[in-house]
Structures are given as C-alpha cells and as structure tokens.
Amino acid sequence: MSGFVHVVVGIVLNARNQLLIAKRPDHLHQGGLWEFPGGKVEEGESGFIALIREFKEEVGIVIKQADSFMEIYHQYSDKNVFLDIWLSRHFEGDATGIEGQEVKWIALHELKKYSFPEANQKIVAKLLSEKI
C-alpha cells in the first residue's frame, strides 16, 4: 500500500518455546518500548530475505526457515507502517543486541508484562490467543 513503510517482524521461538523480544532505543520512533525484532525491507528485497538480513544485523542470529504469520497495516500520527510478520523456530546463533539494544527471551505468558508499540498489539493478542 502506498505511503506505508514496509517492515519485517520476526516472532522467533527457541527450543524452550520462549519468544525473542528487543527494547527499542530511546531515540527511535516508539523508543523505549519492546518489540519483536525486524526492520525495514530494502528496495527489491523479499520479506523473507529482509527478515534474514535484519536478524543477522540486529541480533546476530541466522533465520533458517520462517512462515508468514500475519500482516498489519497501522497508522500512527507521524508514520504509516505495514508489518510483514513471520514466525520461526529454525535459527542458528545466540541472540545479542548488536546495536546496543537490550534483548531477552521470555515465556509467552510474560508478554503482558512488557509495553509494545500500538502496531504490535494485534501480534501480542494473536500470540496469546493461539497455541504456537
């Protein structure tokens, strides 16, 4: 959709069925809130390729396989985003905040303890309502 920033988002689960979340740096849009890692899709890049690139660049893990989970179009007062959300249990490496951001693995039931951007609320709701 024209006027929307295409962003890939990864819902990554480890062997203990924990989700990877990261804290947005304070100086960024929606800074200080928690999110599922990801980033902007570059020109000519598919969502899956962007997911692989962003996870390697931001959290140091290599996504081996992922499935489309959901799509969200969200309008903030200052920005419109298209969230292209993927689910993966297949990755290599240990997650670390390469860009200085805090990252952590949390149990699914702990999601409500963290503040996420408004655009992520539908992801959180879907994760809490489905057996993943």
Image: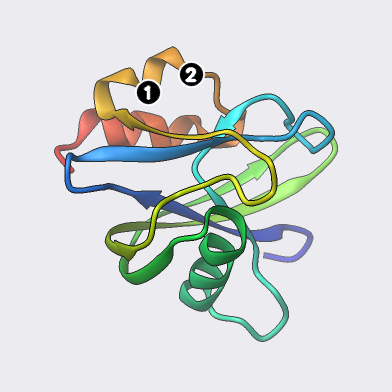
Circle number at residue 111: 1
**Residue for point 84% across, 33% down:** 27
**Residue type marked 2:** Tyr
Q: Quadrant of the C terminus?
A: top left
The image's mark for residue 11 is none
Cα separation, mark 1 vs mark 2, equals: 6 Å
What is the secondary structure assignment of the residue under circle 2? Answer: loop
Residue 50 found in image quarter: bottom right
User: Where residue 5 appears, x then y in whole percent?
Assistant: 72, 58
Q: Which residue appears at 65% of the width and 69% of the height?
A: 41
At a point 64% along the width and 38% down the height, the residue shown is: 101
Q: Which residue is mark 2?
A: 114
Q: Which residue, as the protein is rendered here, is positioned at the far bottom?
A: 44
Q: Label 2: how many residues lie within 10 Å, few (<14), some (14-19) or many (20+)?
A: few
- Residue 114 x %, y %: 48, 18
- Check the image and report above or below for 112 versus 63: above
- Is 29 situated above or below 92? above
Which amino acid, mark 1?
Answer: Leu
